[in-house]
Amino acid sequence: MKHPVTRFSLFLILTVLTAACTEPSSDIAVAVNESRILAAEDDTANWLSHGRTYAEQRYVPLSNINPGNIDRLGLAWHFDFPTRRGIESTPLIIDGVMFVTSSWSMVFALDARTGRQIWSYDPQVPRIWAKNACCDAVNRGVAAWGDKVFVGTLDGYLVALERSTGAVVWRVNTIDREQPYTITGAPRVIKGKVIIGNGGAEFGVRGYVSAFDAETGEQVWRFYTVPGNPDDGFENEAMAEAAETWSGEWWKLGGGGTVWDSMAYDPDADLLYIGVGNGSPWNRNIRSPGGGDNLFVSSIVALRPDSGDYVWHYQTTPGDSWDYTATQSIILADLVIDGETRKILMQAPKNGFFYVLDRLTGEFISAEKFAAVNWASHIDKATGRPVEVDNADYNKGPRLAWPAPFGAHNWHPMSYNPNTGLVYVPAQEVPWLYANDEEFGFIKGQWNTGTDALLGDLPTDPLQIAQLSANMRGFLLAWDPVEQKEVWRYQHAGAWNGGTLSTSGNLVFQGNVIGELVAYSADKGERLWSFTTQTGITAGPVSFELNGEQYVSVAVGWGTLLGILGGPTVAPLQMQNRSRVLTFRRDGEHVLPPLPAKVVHQEPEVTGPPGSEALIRSGHAVYVERCLSCHGFSAVSGGLVPDLRLSNAAVHEQWDAIVLEGQRRPLGMPAFAGILSAEDSQAVRMYVIDRARALAESPRTPFTGM
Ligand code: CA
């Protein structure tokens, strides 16, 4: 025991040396350059960019795994992330190495054959930044170019890492640090420029997308998606024209239009397509009281990737008032329509219509409903505009509408299989009660929807919740984009299922909300194979080939929007977060460690006498406005953040210190002093105690299905 430190150091040195000597591929960083990425379609050994190719079809021409041998598909390896929040990442595969992100924007380089970690990078995102994220501390992946990989961090930095070591090459701030921006999307790289947007439209920001030089991190251009204050002058002609479609003083409310996920690129046309999100706040009568389309919210915009110059736009939801973003997957394909081969772009945005556009001009070709929609009757073919129905206008009174802000399809990637000609959409039907917020007051950095959140909260009666949960439907939809019609669907147990991958082996892979990765036949939708993943899946799977063997990988981990918000609609699933990558191949025999036993029913401590009914009601109103987005509907946790109903006496004693003064800031709980009064804070406490009492008195009904 004389030299424990020395012996430990020696051990470390040996470990590092051994690792260095046995590194097969990480120090051979063959550049990901333009010619390589343009040839990605046939390069089955790699998955070089977010949607596999610039067309973002998420289709792999590999058929080693097919319906004839799918029963041999088994787990090859798993890798545990050190995080416990939702996972939305699409891995990249480059020369035998997987690059995948976890929550809190961490990056991992893994040996794609074995799952062995080569390096990891933790940007040390302050946990408090999660208050600026609508939908969990998620990240959807990295981009690669040259000898680097790039990640956008939740707190707004873009970081270039050396691909072989994970060392930081450069790190640039992409936001005004006083504004509640977040980055959750994967960057894309075009001709040496790293393109990245951001989120925050619920919190009062102005959206934009920027390009940075891949070598130096220098900003090359920035394109704003909504106009700023006209008195400051417009950045370009597109903004001046967009301002004609706004009224009032929208810039004081941010305007929104964030570019938080989808992009695609057509190298022949040299057009970058970006998906633009909802307006800020949601309610258009507050955002732009004189009306107008509010360009470019809820639009697809085509830009020149070298300059960020505007080329064309198509707005899916003019004057959006429902959080109907157009940030969902953009897929490029060449389709024969009316006997003519057209270069088209497809999107199934939140608003429930499946769009086919001419991607050279933005011309509307067709659109049909792919899920329950009752805000518009159809898209007018002559104008390309939706025809709104009376149910759209919730300023005339509360309106029960489909789709919900969750979308008929959200960010979960869809895929296109050129063999079947079908698009595989993770679709869903969730209702939402929209109502005008009569007492709206804008607070930057807080949820600003302009809708009455109290009306949108869930009932507390278990029977009503069960009925509502039964109405939250999710399904895998195979859609014919030429005929604009459904070909088949597979009904899921609930909403919020995973992204899709299609292969030339006539397969579609998709994870689901109850923790299974499933393979379906691409032509008919027959369920052929499944694997129990122990945790919910929202991310899209990938596939690649190494040494003649086809692999399928998916990043899994319960959480993301529904895990945070879903409350009583998802709590019965008792879904635990196991943040992992799972990789499969034929005859894989790896086994996951057993899952710890589920907690069947936790007993709350009822820590005080009930408050008056009026106090509980006012606490509920404050709760839905300021607390619900993290702590869940009806103060029921979906499993990621503490269930407030289980707060013990010590928490209740420290209540104001936690809620108002920020005692738990390092854990991500913001200080609400200046936003909530001491009376508000205590009213919320009374509401939480009331909810704890209801839990204590509730019958112990075992969960039987969602
Ligand atoms: Ca939104």
Image: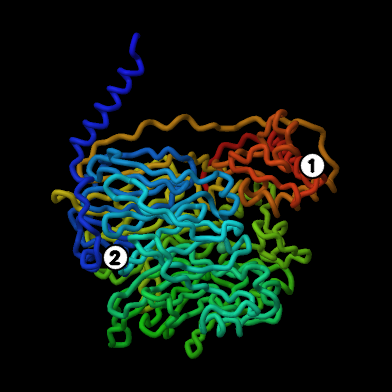
Q: Where is residue 652 in the image (x, y as percent from the top left)?
A: 73, 33
Residue under pointer 2 = 53
Crowd band around label 1 with a 10 angstrom C-alpha radius: few (<14), some (14–19), many (20+): many
| Image quarter hosting the N terminus | top left
Residue shown at 41%/77% (left/top)? Answer: 303
Q: Nearer the viewer, residue 194 or 385?
A: 194
Residue 682 is tagged as 1
Q: Residue furthest top?
A: 1
Q: Considering the numbered disc 2 on the image, is that residue within a helix, a strand or a loop? A: loop
Vertical placement of residue 605 versus 614, above or below: above
The answer to which of marks 1 and 2 sits earlier in the sequence is: 2
Q: Locate residue 220 relative to residue 526 in the image: left or right.
A: right
Q: Which of 690 and 413 is in front in this view?
A: 413
Q: Which of 249 and 704 is in front in this view?
A: 249
Q: Which amino acid does label 2 sit on?
A: Thr
Vertical placement of residue 683 versus 452, above or below: above
Residue shown at 29%/44% (left/top)? Answer: 165
Q: Which amino acid does label 1 sit on?
A: Gln
Residue shown at 39%/54% (left/top)? Answer: 170
Q: Locate residue 417 relative to residue 243 in the image: left or right.
A: left
